[in-house]
């Protein structure tokens, strides 16, 4: 039986099945088209290049497609990469389910649902609680199966809900230290901040940007939908809670250059941004450090300023 891709080392050969998790089109300096593929299975991901591709290749090798391949594991600028020998969509791959090749959250969907439900129960402001509960009821399936990102952090089945739950645990710890924080607002901001990604991605197993994902993005989508849900609940349009929840979503990336529509202007929004940043970076580091031997440095991580982190022997 073929072992998971994360267990292969540079210099070894791989032969088996992988899922195309992400595709980027490129053009060489000579004007030749190529594809950068992020391939993976339940153990992890690895990049590969397909050179001199045809139009058929571009339409065949798309996000969410399971492929059969032969390749060598090589070192490319400090990171492992597949050097392709053969790749195809075979009869065998057509019978395989993409979700069977995706990593999954370390806790069950039921546990994630229970923790989210308990947090909503703890929200005392009836307007905020009603809006949050309406969103979870509206996306009761999607919220608990979608990933939180295409590749950088929590890019696995149920990643969106798991990212939310781990952020809530951080938020609750901070609220116990800083009682001046508005729990209702912070908890609601954590739960709502990334739900727009359900509209941004094509599906739970295909993180290709949708039309609305490309044109609008998950932050404006969600801010607009908060207003829509409030209207359905007959909440007055000038209600402060609506504006505060929209601000939490609009500002959670912190700065415009990081994709934020607004900079945080209330303390709960500032804390939400920090919690989101902590959890995303911890997930990114943990994933890479898990495949690094003690006493060695990780591969460079683009999301962390292209730094390599040392894994201590102690």
Image (cartoon, rainbow, N blue to C red):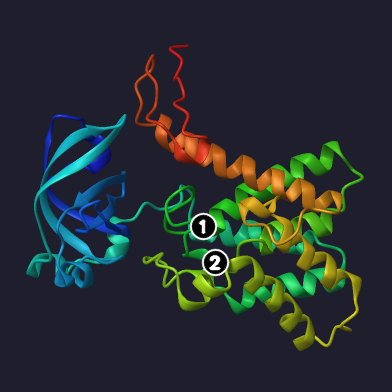
Q: Residue at x 84, y 65 (%)?
A: 244
Secondary structure under badge 2? helix
Q: Residue at x 78, y 54 (%)?
A: 186
| 4, 215: nearer the viewer | 215
Compared to 138, does 156 lie above or below?
above
Say whether residue 71 is left or right of residue 6: left
Q: Position of residue 176 (x, y in %)?
A: 83, 40
Say whether residue 293 is left or right of residue 170: left
Compared to 240, does 85 lie above or below?
above
| 273, 58: nearer the viewer | 58
Name of the residue lying farthest toward the front? 30
Q: Position of residue 160 (x, y in %)?
A: 53, 58
Q: Residue at x 58, y 73 (%)?
A: 216
Name of the residue lying farthest toward the top? 314
Residue 299 visible in the shown view? yes
Say whether residue 134 is left or right of residue 46: right
Compared to 20, does 171 lie above or below?
above
Q: Position of residue 121 (x, y in %)?
A: 76, 63
Q: Number of callouts in the render? A: 2
| 41, 250: nearer the viewer | 250
Does the CB distance between marks 1 and 2 fall below 8 Å? yes
Q: Which mark is on residue 189?
A: none
Residue pointed to by mark 2? 197
| 227, 85: nearer the viewer | 85
Q: Which mark is on residue 148?
A: 1
């Amino acid at each position: 039986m073929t072992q998971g891709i994360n267990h292969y080392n540079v210099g070894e050969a791989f032969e088996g099945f992988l899922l195309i998790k992400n595709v980027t089109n490129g053009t060489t300096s000579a004007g030749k088209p190529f594809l950068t593929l992020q391939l993976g299975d339940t153990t992890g991901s690895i990049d590969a290049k397909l050179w001199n591709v045809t139009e058929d290749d571009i339409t065949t090798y798309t996000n969410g497609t399971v492929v059969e391949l032969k390749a060598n594991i090589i070192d490319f600028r400090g990171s492992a990469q597949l050097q392709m020998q053969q790749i195809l969509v075979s009869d065998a791959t057509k019978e395989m389910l993409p979700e069977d090749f995706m990593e999954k959250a370390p806790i069950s969907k039921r546990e994630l649902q229970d923790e989210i439900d308990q947090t909503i129960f703890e929200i005392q402001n009836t307007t905020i609680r009603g809006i949050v509960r309406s969103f979870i009821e509206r996306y009761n399936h999607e919220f608990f199966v979608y990933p939180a990102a295409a590749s950088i952090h929590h890019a696995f089945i149920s990643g969106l809900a798991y990212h939310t739950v781990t952020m809530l645990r951080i938020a609750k710890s901070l609220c116990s230290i800083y009682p001046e924080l508005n729990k209702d607002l912070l908890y609601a901001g954590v739960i709502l901040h990334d739900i727009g990604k359900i509209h941004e991605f094509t599906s739970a197993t295909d993180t290709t940007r949708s039309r609305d994902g490309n044109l609008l993005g998950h932050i404006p989508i969600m801010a607009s939908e908060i207003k829509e849900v409030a209207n359905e609940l007959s909440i007055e349009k000038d209600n402060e809670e609506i504006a505060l929840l929209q601000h939490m979503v609009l500002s959670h990336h912190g700065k415009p250059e990081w994709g934020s529509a607004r900079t945080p202007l209330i303390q709960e929004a500032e804390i939400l941004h920090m919690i989101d940043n902590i959890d995303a970076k911890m997930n990114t580091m943990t994933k890479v450090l898990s495949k690094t031997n003690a006493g060695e440095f990780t591969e460079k991580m683009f999301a962390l300023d292209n730094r390599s982190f040392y894994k201590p022997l102690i």
